[in-house]
Image (spheres, rainbow, N blue to C red):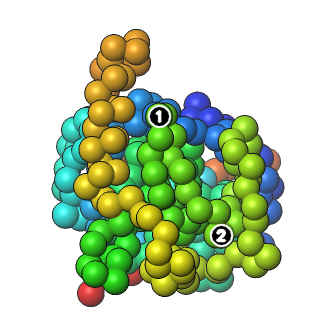
Amino acid sequence: MRHSTSSGLAIVVTAFGLFAAEAVQSTTFVHKRIADLAREADGVLVGRIAQVEARQAPDRDIYTFVTVAHIDAVVGQVAASPLTLRLLGGELLGHGLDVGGPNFTIGEKVVLFVRGNGVQMIPLVGGPQGVFRVVLSADGREEVVDHDGNRVTAVVGNDVVTERGHSRGSLVVGGPATALAPRPLTTPADRLAKARTDQPNTRRVALSEFLAEIRALGATRNGAGGGTRRAVMSVDDFRGITQGTDQNGRVEALTGFESQPHLER
């Protein structure tokens, strides 16, 4: 099965439906500068992850629905709050489909650069590059790390400067060289815990400073010929996804797996 998007992502996924324990992935994301993220997004928002739910679609792939609550729109407009994003991939009752998309932890605060929700298989500009996480410093200040837990130390010109303490979960090409850690941390919680404690004397960008830079970059979209932004819509269903058929053209029965919601507590 081949999926492609217009958001700087080319991907080939070899999957065996839900009859295999895990799907095979080959994912390449084109490097996006922070200016690219801000200008290409339908909207940029800050919010807190309230629910992460894996479901099986009519095409028999697994999708993850991520609900974001307590939303503040930084750039553009958000049509609904809470907002639900639909991402291809996830794990359901021991069956997995991994396409290199971002992971989320319930309760974490995030900055999201959203594009094509319900259309793109990963509705975030540049895939995981369109996710930044908010962590608290020892003195309670909100600071920013990237999707992989690397501290954002500055926003210079059109890009962010990060400390490369953690390896990327997906291959990003065309960007600055990355010194990979010998072993990537396995979960978002691990990465964020490390970001809170590593090298406390290193300067970190405050959330307020980061958002101010995003607003300034996002405001240049129309002047740069990017066109009018669409409002970010919530997608909590499988609209646009067709049901699979067998080799004789008959509709394949779904396996009967139920969704597995994880709710904010």
At 65% from the left and 79% from the top, the residue drawn is 185
Residue visible at 34% across and 23% down?
Answer: 220
Quadrant containing the C terminus is bottom left
Q: Residues within 10 Å of mark 1 (few under 14, many from 20)?
A: few
- Which x, y percent locates residue 221? 36, 23
Q: What residue sits 49% from the left and 84% below the top?
A: 197
Residue 65 in sight here: no
Q: Is residue 151 left or right of residue 166?
A: left
Q: Whole-Å distance between the Cαs marked 2 and 1?
A: 24 Å
Q: Which residue is mark 1?
A: 157
Q: Is residue 75 visible?
A: yes
The residue beneath circle 2 is: 166
Say whether residue 214 is left or right of residue 89: left
Q: Residues within 10 Å of mark 2 (few under 14, many from 20)?
A: many
Q: Is residue 219 above or below residue 186?
A: above
Three-letter amino acid code at the position of disc 1:
Gly
Q: Quadrant of residue 149?
A: bottom right
Between 222 and 236, which is closer to the camera in this rendering?
A: 222
Residue 217 image point, x, y percent: 36, 32
- In this figure, what is the number of numbered marks? 2
